[in-house]
Amino acid sequence: MPPAPASLSIAGAAERVTNGASTVIGGTVVSATGAVVPGHRVVLLRRGPSR
């Protein structure tokens, strides 16, 4: 059984993206022991009103 994900570190541009454009965000999922856990899908949610 693979280790369960414990944390996520992400990196991306710190700027606004114009309407209809896209940006790239990368990251790493690690277990409680600090080992990288490959193959886990992460879903990011937008909170608050759309601007």
Image (cartoon, helix red, strand yellow):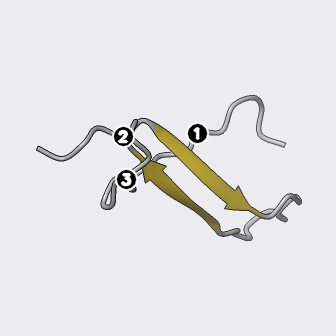
Residue lying furthest right in this view? Answer: 15
Q: For label 2, count other residues whose C-alpha is less than 10 Å away and answer few (under 14), some (14-19) or many (20+).
A: some
How many numbered discs? Answer: 3
- Which of 22 and 5 lies nearest the eye of the viewer? 5
Tell me which residue sits at (65%, 69%) in the image: 24
Q: CA distance from mark 1 to mark 2?
A: 18 Å
**Amino acid beneath label 3:** Arg
Residue lying furthest top in this view? Answer: 48
- Which of 32 and 21 lies nearest the eye of the viewer? 32
Is the residue 47 above or below the residue 13 in the image?
A: above
Tag 2, which secondary structure? loop
Q: Position of residue 22 (x, y in %)?
A: 69, 69
**Amino acid beneath label 1:** Leu
- Which of 35 and 17 lies nearest the eye of the viewer? 35
Q: Earlier in the sequence, mark 1 or mark 2?
A: 2
Q: Position of residue 51 (x, y in %)?
A: 84, 43
- Residue receiving disc 1: 45
- Residue receiving disc 2: 5
> Dividing the image into 4 quarters, which one contains the N terminus?
top left
- Residue receiving disc 3: 41
Residue 7 in the figure: left or right of residue 2: right
- Mark on residue 35? none
- Which of 16 and 34 lies nearest the eye of the viewer? 34
